[in-house]
Structure formats: C-alpha cells, structure tokens
Amino acid sequence: MPAPAVMPRDSLLDVFDELAARPGICVIHDDGLRARTRRYAEVARAAGAFAARLAAAGIGRGAAVLIACENRPEWIAAFWGVILTGAVVVPVEPGASPDLVARIARAVEARLVLVWSEERPGAGLVSAPVWTLRDLAWPDDTRAPLVPPRPALTRADVAEILYTSGATGDPKGVIVTHGNLLANLEPVEREIARYRPWLRLVGSLRILCLLPLSHMFGQALALLVPQALSGTTVFASARAPADVVTTIRRRGVHVLVAVPKTLELLRSHLSHAVAGAGDDRGPRTVWQAWWRYRALHRRLGPRFWSVVVGGAPLDPVLERFWSLRGFAVIQGYGLTEAAPIVTVSHPLDRTAGSVGRAMPGVEIRLADDGEILVRGGNVTPGYFHDPALTARALEGGWLHTGDLGAIGPDGRVFVHGRKKELIVTPEGQNVVPDDVERVLDRQPGVRESAAVGLPAAPGSPAERVHAVLVVEPGADPERIVAAANAALEPHQRVRRAHAWPEAALPRTAGTGKLRRLEIRAWAGAGAGAPVPGHVAADRLTAVLADVTGRTDLSPETPFDALGLSSLERIEILDRLEAEYQTRLDERAFTGARDVASLRALVEGPAPAEPAADTLTLPAWSRAWPARLVRRVMLPFVVLPLTRLMARIDVDGRQHLDGLDGPVIFAANHQSYLDAPVILSALPRAWRHRLAPAMAKEFFAAHFAAAGHTRAARWRSHLAYGLAALVFNGFPLPQRDAGARLALRYMGELADEGLSLLIFPEGLRTTHGEIAPFRPGVALVAARLGLPVVPVRLVGLDRVLHRTWRLPRPGPARVVFGAPLRLEGDDYDALAARLERAVTGLAAAA
C-alpha cells in the first residue's frame, strides 16, 4: 500500500497551523505530585500570546532567544511563540552552569533569555533581558490573543542553534533550519500514515519523553512526532526507576523515549521488583511473552508496549531483555547535525545490534577508516560563526559524524563507537571502549564502568586499556578485571582498574554519555588527584545543611537531633533521590540514626523494592459509592447536627466568588468540630469537593496494632473508616513515615479537582490562641501550586473543647480571607506569612 502524500510545507509555521487545529491533549507534565494537562488549542493560544509579547518587545525575525528550562508545557508554547515571530530558538541544558549559559548568550547575541522561575543565570553575566516561563500566559477561548503578522519564512531560514559538546570538547553551535526539521518529520509522517488504522486501536498515543528538549532527539520525539500522531507527550520530573514505572502506569503511557542508561536502570529495578521478570528463558511469540511476563506488564500498565532508544548505542543484551518480554524496541541513530534522525529500526523487522536503515532522503556511506558519513536534507548547513569547523565536518558535502560503524548488505547500519574515543594499542590495534564496558558491566559487583586509554609508556602515543569502575561494597576491582579479561580479546584486555570514589560516574545531562575526558584525566592523574572541572563535593551534607541551616554536621550527628518535621524529611528525601539518582525507602530513611547511617543508605545499593509503608491512603473514599454516601450524609445528617451544636456566623465568603478550585483551606485548629463547621460555612458547590487532612497519629491503633488492645484497635478502625467515608478525610503524618506518600495523594486529589483542608498548627489549642504554623502547609502549597485560603475559627473551643466529651451548644464564627500564593522554598517564612493572614482575620471575626 503506497504511503499517503504529505502536504508540502514552506516552514514550521505550516506545522504550527496543523497543531493548532488538532483536538485532544498535547502535553501532560507530571511533577511527581500533580499532573498539569494542556490541550493542543491551549498550546496554540499560549504560543500566539507569547509571540505577541515578543513582538511588542521588538524581538522578531533572526533574533536569538535562549531557553534554559526543564521540560514543561511552557517550553513548548515558548518554542512555537518564538517560531511564529521568525526568531531563532537557542535551547540550553536546564542544568547548565551560569557561565555556560552566559557564554552561549554572548556567542549568539541573545536578545532574550527564558528561565523557569526567578533564578538568574549568573548575576551580571547575561546582558539580555531575562523572562520567567512560569509567568507565561495561558489565554482562554474568550480572550484569544492577537498574533503578530507572520514573516515569510522558507526552509532555508534558521529555526534553531543548538550548542552541543557531547561527552567531550568545547560547545559548538549547530545551525538547524526549518528545512532540516521538516526533512526529518515528513518521512516519519509518511511511515506513520501507513499504520494509522492500527494506531487508532490504542486511541491517542501517549509518549513519555525523558530526554530534555534542549536535545534534538528530545525535540523530535516530544515536539514533532507526537504532533504528527495527534498524540500526547508526557513529561516527568521524577527520574528514579520506581518513579518512571509509576508514571508509565499512572499516566497510561504507550511509548517510553529514553537513553540506554535509563533502560538499563529500569531493567535492574524491574528484575528485582517483579517476580520472574529477570528470567531470560523467554517464549518465542509476543503473545506468549505477554502471558509469561504478565506480572511485569501489570506493573507497567496495560497500555505500555514500546521503548524508543537513542543518544547512544544500545547494548544487544539490553535490547534482548525488552524485546524478549514482548515490548517493541525501536532504536535510532542520529546526531544534532542531522536534526537529528539518520537511521531508525523497524519494530517488526529488526536485527540485533543494528540501529536500522537510513531514513528516506538520507544517504549513508563509510569513509576508508570506517567513519559514518551522512548526506541529506536533514543535515545542518554548518556551525554558527565557525567556517573552519564547518569545512572540516562537511567535507565534500558529506557530514563526518565522528562515529565508526558498518553497513550490512541489506542497508542496516551498525554503530561501533566514537572515532576519537578509540584506544590505539602499541600493536596498532583499535579498541572500542563500548565493547570493553559491556563485558565489565556484566561482572558481579560492577554498577558501571568506563574504559579509557592511558599512555603505554611516558610520552608514548600508544595506549593501554584501563578500567574505571563503580563497584558494590566489598567487591574487588582486581578480581572483576581478571574475570572480564577472560572474556575479552587479547588486545582489549584491561591493564589496570581504578575505583571511582563516588556513587556514579560523571555523565552529560540528558543523553547520559560518559564524560570520558574527565574520567581519563582523573585516572591519568593517579586516580585521586584533583581534576579541573570535577568537584567531589559532599552532596549529602550539602543537602542537609541547606535544609536545616546546620553547618556543624558530623557522621555522629543524630538524625533526630536535626528536629525535622515529616514534611521537611520529604524535602530532604526528594533532593537526595534527585542528587544520587536513586530511589530510597522512606521507612528506612526515617529510621536512620545519624548522618553516617543516612550516608550508608543513600550511597549504598538501591533497594530492590521499597518496603511497603504502614500508611495506607483511602482511595476507596473517592469511588462513586462513597461519594453517594456523602451526598446523603452531609446535607441530611452531618450539617444539621453541626448546626444544632454551633450557631455559625460566616464572613468573607465573597473571597470565594470567582475562585476556581482546587485550593487549600488553611484554618486554625480549636475543636473536633472544626471540619464540620467549615463544611457548613462553605457554599454548597465547595462542600462535596473538599478533603480534610487528619493527623495519622490520632489513628495510631488503626495503622500499628502493636501495643493496643483489641477494643482500641476496633475503635480506631471505626473512627478512621467513618472519617474517610463521611468527610473524605485522609491521614497526614506529623512524625511517622509516609508523609511523601500523603503528599502524592494530595496531588491526586488536586488533579481530580478536590480542595484540601489543612490545620497548620498540627494541634488543637487550649484557650483559642493560635499556635505557630508548621512549615508543612507551605511545602504542600508550593509543591502542588495551589492557592491558599486563610480561614479563622472563633468560639469552637467553647462549644467542644478538646478536653470535653460532649459539646455545649453556642455561637461560633468562620471568616474566610483573600487567597494567597505561597511560592518559593523558604517554607518557614511562607508559613509565618500564612499565620499572619489567619491572625489578621481577627478584626473581621
């Protein structure tokens, strides 16, 4: 069947018009707590509004706009807004140093720098204006933006300049034109069109992209290909393997886009976490694989069926793991200079170890030394302001990729490694580091490895193979090398092993490539001498000091002596997981005795599967039967009884007019009647969309039976069940483990449009006074991005005091204040601000 024709396009402006007309969800951003969703029409309107803002600032055709931001819907809207004005996008790694951002901004003469929030890329280093993407407008239908007149763009116009250094070398600016990007997109569209009837069976395709949009591979699979499919791109902030698995299942992901290192970490996690997942005695057909590994497929969700990998060669053993378990493995080869796709493998016609055949319109051949050469409409016209480098890289009209490879008789391409990373032995034989590393990584006790060449003798240009290893505690590097050498060819054998002093080897952001120059310099300097650009900082104590303000920490400092609340522990836990790229068991973290035992936890091997927490959250209370019970109980039982006990006077309800939920209601705490009274004071539209937080410790006998009588356990079970059923309440730990789980649950509630009721004091006062607000409420508000409505309660301590068994009917007052936005990470200061707002409602009360 011939592929349907793709309408000819002059520039990316035509792609934008198609995007704006598409129905459905364009992008979902899962920050680990909440999912923010934007439809295609919303992205188009936001892009138009941003283009109008750029035009008003005098930024138009040819002007460079630098984007230094992590993957977010705002990144996509800003990208299209820049394209609409004819300006040039200059993406930068979100974790790039201020100095690098400033150097790139100066090199392209940037007219504007875009960052996520108020952080600036170095004081005084960037002269261009800095805008925050957090402030990007998302106009609704009634306020559609006026898009500025479009420039007459062609395929030859520059769309982007991408600075890339890969794993080594100085950054170089790669020019990418509108035509380069279209030359990559249009063949993909034609191939997809052949299978569109089958794709309709899965509905809107959801692609989880873990690569940064500052990379062309990330852009291709997050910006352009999903749009061609009318699919949805999913971004996730959490990158630990357990979190990636959760995101895939929770967001209904069909396809994962990642680098090989991510797939390797996922394989390790799933092999330990799912019974039988690591068994390689697999079946022969996909259907048999789905049945045999059904537990693995349940863990990842019923929709997940494919992985797309690029950025580095995929180990055939890793490829076999995923394909043997019934997942389609699509491997590509490309580089920024090719915008980026050069080859792609077909999921139904694969050869192990091959990166597929050349894309339509792309020519590939090998140089005499085996270097892969590429020519086609996707190839860059050159490097920004560097004609000498352009002439070398595009010699004879062919792009010299710097990669060594082979081409089979059927056109399949095999990539062997980087030409400049070859290790040339004194015997004149070439050693590809990747080949040595695959053997090393299979040895027991090896977490990861890097093969580097060091001079065979002082002053000699020839090199011997050395291994830099990250090993498990107790593993012997010399024994590991001996076992690996038995499997290597004579010229590949490792001469010496070096144990890397940290928990992971240094890698480039996004693609995860080894920083070989840094590793080689460290090994050559005696495996311990300082290396320029490498800082062996104590990451653990740096995080603890930043959160606690303590700079006097020692290994013997008791962890409990730091005086952390459960929500402050969340902050430390999340930051350590991000810093060490691992997943920590919250109960083991909470049980750490001192800094030394905490260090052993975070720097030791990751747990196969975090232990189940004692905190169970009442997801059942959000199901329709429970909602039906509340629809009856609240108006006919709870509210009438509440109004019999308390004669409620309400003020400030006008602050809720026009306010869209979800929000956080933050109230002072006086009585067991606080939640029912607030429900009674709220307008009816808000009552059934509220979830109050309850102190987990109040239901201690429910969560931990030890030490409690059977009667106490049953009373606690009954109280907890009724609170969850009738009020939609959920437990929030004050001291125990489980706070992070509760925070994620609050994110799920907010995603469903439910508002939260929190009592920031954490206790009921004795005489109606307001105790200091704990910082946890600020953390929740800031992390979930919810406005906070201050609520002042007066008189309920005289209706049902915390020491009384029965109420004494009387007057009470509820005052709602104006909503606040609590942003930033100074949670103590934000909580104090909220406390002042609640206290300030006393005059109205």
Image: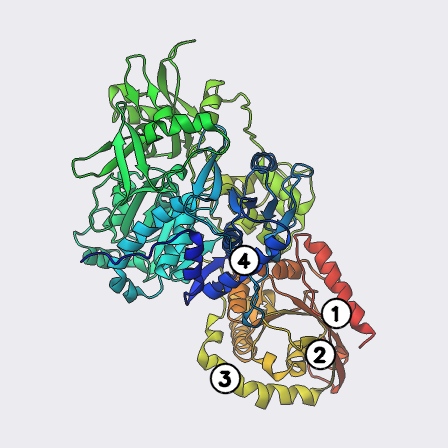
Mark 2 vs 3, N-terminal side: 3
Mark 1: amino acid = Thr
Q: How crowded is mark 2: few (under 14 residues within 10 Å), some or many (20 or more)?
A: few
Compare residues 642 and 308 and report the one nearer the observer. Answer: 308
- Quickly name the residue at label 2: 654
Q: How crowded is mark 1: few (under 14 residues within 10 Å), some or many (20 or more)?
A: some
Residue 790 pos. (x, y %): 71, 70
Callout 2 touching callout 1 (CB < 8 Å): no
Sequence-first disc among 1 and 3: 3
Q: Please tell me in which quadrant of the rendered image residue 716 appears.
A: bottom right
Residue 559: x and y in percent read 62, 46
Q: Using a 10 Å C-alpha cutoff, classify the residue at mark 4 as few (fewer than 14 neighbours), some (14 to 19) or many (20 or more).
A: few
Q: Do the residues labelled 4 and 3 touch (CB within 8 Å)?
A: no
At 42% from the left and 67% from the top, the residue drawn is 24
Q: Give the vertical position of 635 relative to 529 (above or below).
A: below
Q: In this view, does 798 lie to the left or right of 172?
A: right
**Do the residues bearing badges 1 and 4 touch, measured as CB atoms within 8 Å?**
no
Residue wearing tag 1 = 765
Q: Position of 502 compared to 763: left or right?
A: left
Residue 231, percent from left and from top: 38, 61
Q: Earlier in the sequence, mark 4 or mark 3?
A: 4
Q: What element carries label 2?
A: helix
